Image: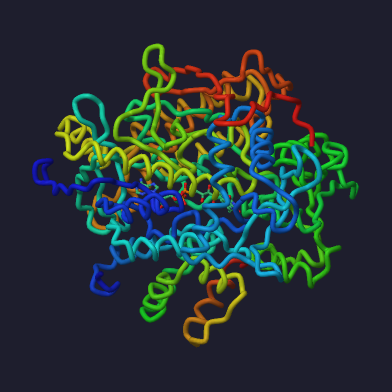
Amino acid sequence: MNSLYQMPENEADSRLRWRCRRGMLELDLILNNFIDREYVHLNNQQKQLLDQMLDYPDQLLFDLFLGFMQSADKDIASLVSYIRKSVTT
Amino acid sequence: MTISNIQRRRFDSLIIGAGGGGLRAALQLAEADASVAVVSKVFPTRSHTVAAQGGMNAALANVLPDNWHWHMFDTVKGSDYLGDQDAIEYMCRAAPKVVYELEHFGVPFSRLDNGRIYQRPFGGQSQNFGGEQAARTCAAADRTGHAILHSLYQQNIRAKTHFFDEYFAVDLLKDDDGNILGAFVFDIHTGEELIIEAKTTLLATGGAGQLFRTTTNALINTGDGMGMALRAGIPLQDMEFFQFHPTGIAGRGMLITEGARGEGGYLVNVNGERFMERYAPKAKDLASRDVVSRAIETEVREGRGCGPDKDHVMLKLDHLGVDVIQKRLPGIRQTCITFLGMDPAEEPVPVYPTAHYTMGGIPTDRHGQVVIPVKDTPEEAVTGLYAAGECACVSVHGANRLGGNSLLDILVFGRAAANHIIDYLKENHYHRPLNEKSVEKAYQRLHRWDDTGEGESVEKIRSDLKRVMEKNCGVFRTQDVLDNGIKEVSALHEKLKHARIKDHSAMFNTARVEALELENLMDVALATVYSASARTESRGAHSRVDFQERDDMNWMRHTLYSLEGRKLDYKPVRTKPMTVATFPPKARVY
Ligand SMILES: Cc1cc2nc3c(=O)[nH]c(=O)nc-3n(C[C@H](O)[C@H](O)[C@H](O)COP(=O)(O)OP(=O)(O)OC[C@H]3O[C@@H](n4cnc5c(N)ncnc54)[C@H](O)[C@@H]3O)c2cc1C
C-alpha cells in the first residue's frame, strides 16, 4: 500500500479519514472528533504517527484511548494523550 | 471507464461482510475447498462484531443448571412469540457446539476455577422454563466480539479465503431468471470497479443502527445489505422491530452492557426510587430489554427523569465498590471517565435507551437461504442468495432479541448458510451468464453521484433522517407520530434524489461512499416506518401507546415490506419447532 506521504494531500486526508471508521462507536467518536478539530494543527510527523496508529486493532486503540493501557513508545503515548484530551475539551 | 472495461473475477462463493457472520461462513466454505471471496468496506477486524463486549449464550450449564430447551423457551418468550420456533430450536441446540468450535479456533473464553468456561447471567435468562435466573453467557473477559473476530480472521487467512478489503458493494447482480450471481463492487482506495461473479452470494453486512441519532452502533452500520436486497426486489421482514438498549450513556449513545446490571447495578429515578421493582417485580433490572427501555421512557415521560431537562434516569453502580467495578466492569468505568469525566464508582451514570439492534432484515430460512413470497407460497428460496447475521431475519429474535443471542445467531447461521452453500455447489458446477442490465443498473447507481452542480447536502439529509427516525420511530409510538414519520422520511427520500457531492475524485472518495450508504439507510428507514405504522399492536420492541396490548389474533405474523410501491405483505410465524412441542403465546411477565 502507498505510504501516506506519496499521495497528494487531499487524498492522504481522505484515506486517513476512512481509516478512522472503526468497528466501535467509541473509537468513531474519539477519532472523528480529533480529526475534525485537530487535524489541521498536526505536523507531518504527527500525521505519520496517527496513520501508523490506525493500523492497531480496535481493541488496542480502545484500551489506549480509554486509558487501560499506556504505549511504551513515547511518541505514540504523547499522541494518545493529545487525542484523549481532545475528547473532553 | 465503461462497463465493458470493468474487470470481472469469478468465485464459487461471494460473501459481502467480514463480521462474525461473514467470517464464520467463509471459514466453513474455505475449509470445504470452495473458492471464497469476502468483500468488506472496512478492514475485516474493524467490523462491528468487534464491539460486542458482553458475550454469547449457550446452555453449557457450567455455573448453574441449564439445557438448550430452557434457552429455547427464553428466546421464544423474549421474541414475544414472533420468533420462528424451528430456527430458534436449531440455534439453541447448536449453541454449545459453536462455542466449543470457537474455543478450538483460539477464542480465549474466561474460565472458572475448575477450568470450565465461565458463564454470566444476562437479562431474560431462566432455568426450568421461566424459573430462577440462569447463567448462560460465555465471554472472553469484556472483549468477546474482538476475540471471536480476530480468531476467525486468522483462521480464514490460514484457510486461504480471498479478501477484498476496503471494497464497497454497490448492488447485487442477477441472471435473466432473477437468480443472484454476485455483486458490483469498487475499491475504496482507487475507485476501480469490479464485477464479482459467484455461484452463490451471502449477505452478512450487519445492522442499521445509524438510522437513529442516539445509537450504540458504529458509523459503518448503515444497512447496506438490506438496501441491496430491497433494490433486488427482495422484501425486508419485521423492520418495525428495532431494539433500543435500555442503558446507553444519555446523549451519547454508548452502551453500558447489561453485565452492569447482571453484576448488581440498578436504575433509579429522580426520587432515588428503584423503579424497575414496579414494572418487573421478579426480574427487576434484569427484565428483558424492551421492558426496561419502556420503563425508563415512562419514568421520563411522567416527569420522574433526572438532570436539568429531566430527560434520563440514573444507573447506580457505586454501591458495588471500586474493586468489583474495576474487576468486572473496567470498560464501563473508563468509558464514563473518558467521555463524561465522572467515575461510576463514585456517582451514578446518566442513561437513556439507545438504538442498538435491528431485529428485522432480509428474510431467510434456517439454512440461511433468502426466501420470498411467490404467488401462494409464503417462502420460496431465491436461488444463489443467502443472508446471515444482523442483516438477516431468520427469525430467531422475533420482536425482541435477548442479550447474548446475536453473536450466537451470526455464528450459527453463518455456519448453516455455508453448509447449505457447500451442498448447492456440489450440484451447480458452472457460472450462469449475467444479465448485463443488472450490471448497468448498479453502474448507473454509482455514477449518478458524478453529477455536478447545486443540490442538497448528503450530510444534512443524513442528520435530518436520524433526527426524524428518533422522534417518529423510537421507543414509544402512536399512529400520528408514525404517520408523520412516513411523511417526513418520504420528503427526505425525495430530497436525496437531488443531492450532490462536491468531491468527484476516484481515490478515497469517502463522500461518495457516504452518499451510497445514505441511499441504503433511506430505503431501510422507509421500510421501518411503514412497517411500524401498520402494526396496530404492541409486541416486543414495537411499543404502541395507542395499542398497548399484544394482539395474537391479528398480528402473530411477520411483516414484509417491498420497495416497489412501498407495499406491505404478511406471512405466518413458524410456530412449529423441529422436534419439541410448540411454546404457545402467553403474556410476557418477568
Ligand atoms: C456495542 C454493542 C455491543 C454488543 N454486544 C453484544 C454481546 O455482548 N452479545 C451479542 O450476542 N451481541 C452483541 N451485540 C450485537 C452484535 O455485536 C452484532 O449483532 C453482530 O456482531 C453483528 O455481526 P454481523 O456479522 O452480522 O455484522 P458486522 O460485524 O456488523 O459486520 C458487517 C460487515 O459487513 C461489511 N459491509 C457492510 N456494508 C458493506 C458494503 N456495502 N460493502 C462491503 N462490505 C460491507 C462491513 O465492512 C463488515 O465487515 C452488540 C452490539 C453492539 C452495538
Which of B478/B370 is in front?
Answer: B370
Q: Is residue B257 above or below residue B150?
A: above
Q: Nearer the viewer, residue B569 or B120?
A: B120
Relative to B78, residue B378 above or below: above
Q: Residue at x 67, y 30 (%)?
A: B80
In the rendered view, tell whether residue B140 sits above or below residue B576: below
Residue A18 lies, in percent from the top left, at: 38, 59
Residue at the location (86% across, 63% down)? B319
Q: Residue at x 63, y 66 (%)?
A: B110
Q: Position of residue B380 (x, y in %)?
A: 38, 23
Q: Is residue B442 left or right of residue B301?
A: left
B196 vs A20, left or right, is left
Q: Nearer the viewer, residue B80 or B48?
A: B80
The residue lying toward the viewer, choosing from B163 and B13, is B13
List x then y, in percent, for residue B528. 52, 29
Q: In the drawing, does residue B191 fall left or right of residue B418?
A: left
Residue at the image point whose x is 33% and y is 47% from the top: B15
Q: Residue furthest front?
A: B579
